[in-house]
Image (cartoon, rainbow, N blue to C red):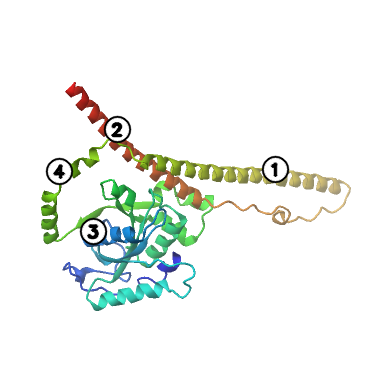
Amino acid sequence: MASRKEGTGSGTTSSSSNTGAGGKGKGKGGSGDSAVKQVQIDGLVVLKIIKHYQEEGQGTEVVQGVLLGLVVEDRLEITNCFPFPQHTEDDAEFDEVQYQMEMMRSLRHVNIDHLHVGWYQSTYYGSFITRALLDSQFSYQHAIEESVVLIYDPIKTAQGSLSLKAYRLTPKLMEVCKEKDFSPEALKKGSITFEHMFEEVPIVIKNSHLINVLMWELEKKSAVADKHELLSLASSNHLGKTLQLLMDRVDEMSQDILKYNTYMRNMSKQQQQKHQYQQRRQQENMQRQSRGEPPLPEEDLSKLFKPLQAPARMDSLLIAGQINTYCQNIKEFTAQNLGKLFMAQALQEYNN
């Protein structure tokens, strides 16, 4: 995944856009002091992402692709995208970076926005907060300041509501990732918690007037029975699967906490050993001094007691962030089901 992010966006310039705002686009060389406060996505991009998953996504396997567009003031406009082709480890000759550059060059030749503004990825029951995503987004955001990652949840979308969210790394986490120091002291100094790792950017889906008219006509022609499918009281396996994934992450968090507690016990034990050694050394020097002998030379305690390697805490933060995401999904799912149950109860009491 990291190889897809290196070298992206270098040498790109603003392209003429079909939205009429091409002259205001900017790349990495533009003024980077304006943060992205909104993401505007063309409806065609959303359909391409959905179609990509339907054609190549299978089970837990995720699909990924490149987002193209331009930046207008504090708004990121995503006007096009293209997928990463599926290939196995045996395809050693396939160069992902070269593939991206050729695709962007081809789009430029047909006068389509080719400025690299981020990437997208599908998710399986909301399982997207991983170290791979963190490293990839850091590479993107370090090279292209305004870049975002779009997370598409096909399972939640299949239940009747489009699930598409845009995320960026927070400035605090960007500083920590630049230093590549994920020790407990560094994370504490940077005030990094799982709530301060990713920031969600509001999304607005924009369609042309012709598309809006077409959607209005399709809505009029849709069957009435299809509109009541969301009121079904039957519960799918979505809740059970999410709870299972939540328990797995809690187990991982428990194991990580045990490792950290073991490190703290070993650290405390080593500190006691150092203190006892220094006391014995001091008493021995006092005895030698009383006999008129020179004191023993001071020794480097770091050689006698090797410093213990502190476990990296970034994985714990990622697990905590994923647990929080699962809890939010369960909260949304149960809120919808409870609402339907209370409504069904009220209707039954009214009929009786």
Q: Nearer the viewer, mark 4 or mark 1?
A: 4
Secondary element type, mark 1: helix
Q: Residue furthest right?
A: 291
Secondary element type, mark 3: strand
Question: What residue did someone put label 4 on?
Answer: 224
Label 4, label 3: how far apart the Cα atoms are = 31 Å
Residue type beneath disc 4 = Val
The residue under the point 12% across, 57% down is 214
Residue type beneath disc 1 = Gln
Q: Position of residue 217 (x, y in %)?
A: 10, 54
Q: Of callouts 4 and 3, which one flags the residue occurring earlier in the amino acid sequence?
A: 3
| Residue 60 visible (yes or no) | yes
Question: What residue did someone put label 3 on?
Answer: 40
The residue under the point 24% across, 71% down is 113
Q: Position of residue 90 (x, y in %)?
A: 49, 70
Q: Of callouts 4 and 2, which one flags the residue occurring earlier in the amino acid sequence?
A: 4
Residue 45 vertical position relative to residue 279 in the rendered view, above or below: below
Label 4, label 1: how far apart the Cα atoms are = 75 Å
Q: Of callouts 1 and 2, which one flags the residue occurring earlier in the amino acid sequence?
A: 1
Residue type beneath disc 3 = Gln
Residue type beneath disc 2 = Leu
Res 338 label: 2
Residue 5 vertical position relative to residue 202 in the rendered view, above or below: below
Res 272 label: 1
Secondary element type, mark 4: loop
